[in-house]
């Protein structure tokens, strides 16, 4: 039997890598883990956690306005960007410390360095030049924003990474993209008082979400004052005296302080030594894995965004736990990527689980669609015109709820709870038998007794 320095070596200290390393170490395995930037990965350091803190900060401008309708007199308010950054940085440092503490308590050996593969069992630690060997290796290096280097003037633009560390809050910003990152940051910057424009090549933002939610959010954002330019793209950016001059395909004259590119993400696989180790990647550079997260090399696995399967933090953690079951508990377990509940922390929020109406219509001969649109109770006194939308997509043949979609306050929280009955295969009859909690917005989910319409063979009837 060959002798190795480690039972497991993990390259990448994000959510998936840390979970796999920590749990394996707690099982008594000798584990090493290397991270070149900061432990916690994209989500904790410059992703969903600081973004959600920014979302909270950006909501206060509306909270102050709404208070008047409930009898409150709010004095003059002002916003200090630097104080928000300082508070955010303090919280992120605390969370990174917890990630390190968890690894340390499990007795995993932590390396603060970039690591690259030398061969199927050997890893080089670049800070010291040291090489170590491992029986099993996990690649969990995540992804990064696509900089679109072919765009003239791309170097003048920022990505979501830099958005968390801007020295000053811009007066105006143009955000390119129509996915959840672009949409969330458009709402964040607008809420903080920045003149905000979103530009997207498609016909409507959030292409993979239900059409009612996409349209409803688009209308809400424009009503707030966010400018949305669809069917258009940036063709060039140049520095001018008063900011950045942007050229677009449709010749829209735009001059802004900041341009942010939110046009997809790229797996972190360059110069990682994958070819030397025999690890195969696809055309986008993502590591190719089988249904158990094993790469083309039998002792090397890959988890999370570097595989470009589903780019969500809980998915990376789930894949890590399946890896542990498969490799260390003699219980081969495939990650389950079906019916994943997700949220877009726009304003208003989107929460969703299961199939959209469009996708369901392609799979099932007949659907029942239950839809409610209403003004939430809080808006009746605040005077805000924002609407909530709730939809249930039901397979008419067996009455199973195969999709649930919400636009409105706390939609993300509702989506997490809806994920349980949808995953469990509950029927519309189960929803109907459930007593409503009144007065709540979510009671609509159990009080829509008659279909709003049906879809047969892809046609609405």
Image (cartoon, grey):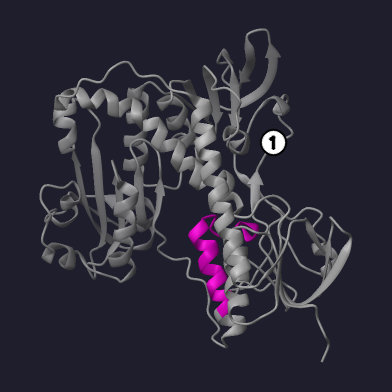
Q: Quadrant of residue 303?
A: bottom right
- The residue lying at 57 percent from left, 67 percent from top is 19
16 in relation to 374, above or below:
below
Q: Report the front residue among 279 and 89.
A: 89
In the shown orientation, is residue 188 left or right of residue 143? left
304 in relation to 253, above or below:
below
In the shown orientation, is residue 257 left or right of residue 389? right
Q: Among all residues in the image, which is located at the extreme right? A: 129
251 in relation to 370, above or below:
above
Q: Helix, strand or loop at disc 1?
A: loop
Dominant SS in magenta: helix
Residue 394, percent from left and from top: 25, 60
Q: Report the front residue among 260 and 227.
A: 260
Is residue 321 highlighted in magenta?
yes
Q: Residues within 10 Å of mark 1 (few under 14, many from 20)?
A: some
**Residue 205 visible, this angle:** no
Q: Quadrant of the N terminus?
A: bottom right
Residue 357, percent from left and from top: 33, 52
In the shown orientation, is residue 261 left or right of residue 377? right
Residue 26, percent from left and from top: 58, 77
Is residue 74 highlighted in magenta?
no
**Residue 367 visible, this angle:** yes
Q: How many marks?
A: 1
Q: Report the front residue among 255 and 51.
A: 51
Q: Which residues are magenta?
A: 305-324
Residue identified by numbered label 1: 148
- The residue lying at 33 percent from left, 42 percent from top is 213
Q: Report the front residue among 87 and 176.
A: 87
């Amino acid at each position: 039997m060959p002798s190795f320095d480690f039972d497991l070596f993990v390259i990448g200290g994000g959510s998936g890598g840390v979970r796999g390393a920590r749990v394996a170490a707690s099982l008594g395995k000798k584990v090493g883990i290397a991270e070149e930037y900061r432990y916690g990965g994209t989500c904790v350091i410059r992703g969903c956690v600081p973004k959600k803190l920014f979302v909270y900060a950006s909501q206060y401008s509306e909270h102050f306005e709404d208070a008047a309708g409930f009898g409150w007199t709010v004095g003059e308010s002002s916003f200090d960007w630097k104080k928000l950054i300082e508070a955010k940085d303090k919280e992120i440092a605390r969370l990174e410390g917890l990630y390190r503490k968890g690894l340390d308590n499990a007795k995993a050996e932590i390396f603060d360095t970039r690591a690259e593969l030398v061969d199927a069992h050997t890893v080089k630690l670049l800070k010291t030049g040291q090489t170590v060997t491992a029986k099993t290796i996990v690649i969990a290096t995540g992804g990064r924003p696509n900089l679109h280097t072919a765009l003239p003037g791309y170097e003048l633009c920022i990505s979501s990474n830099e958005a968390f560390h801007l020295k000053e809050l811009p007066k105006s910003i143009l955000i390119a993209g129509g996915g959840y990152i672009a949409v969330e940051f458009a709402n964040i910057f607008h809420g903080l008082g920045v003149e905000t424009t979103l530009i997207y090549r498609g016909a409507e933002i959030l292409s993979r979400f239900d059409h009612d939610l996409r349209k409803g959010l688009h209308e809400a954002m424009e009503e707030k004052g966010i400018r949305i330019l669809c069917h258009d793209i940036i063709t060039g950016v140049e520095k001018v005296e008063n900011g950045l001059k942007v050229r677009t395909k449709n010749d829209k004259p735009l001059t802004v302080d900041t341009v942010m590119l939110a046009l997809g993400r790229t797996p972190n696989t360059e110069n990682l030594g994958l070819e030397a180790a025999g690890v195969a990647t696809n055309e986008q550079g993502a590591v190719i894995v089988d249904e158990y997260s094993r790469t083309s090399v039998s002792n090397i696995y890959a988890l999370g965004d570097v595989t470009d399967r589903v780019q969500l933090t809980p998915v990376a953690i789930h894949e890590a736990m399946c890896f542990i079951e498969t490799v260390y508990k003699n219980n081969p377990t495939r990650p389950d990527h079906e019916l994943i509940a997700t949220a877009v922390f726009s304003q208003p929020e989107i929460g969703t689980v299961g199939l959209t109406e469009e996708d369901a219509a392609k799979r099932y001969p007949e659907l029942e669609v239950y839809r409610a649109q209403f003004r939430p109770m809080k808006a009746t006194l605040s005077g805000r015109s924002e609407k909530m939308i709730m939809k249930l997509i039901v397979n008419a043949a067996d009455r199973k709820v195969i999709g649930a979609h919400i636009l409105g306050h706390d939609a993300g929280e509702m989506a997490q709870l809806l994920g349980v009955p949808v995953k469990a295969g509950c029927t519309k009859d189960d929803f109907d038998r459930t007593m409503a909690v009144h007065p709540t917005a979510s009671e609509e989910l159990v009080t829509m007794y008659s279909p709003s319409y049906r879809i047969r063979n892809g046609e609405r009837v």
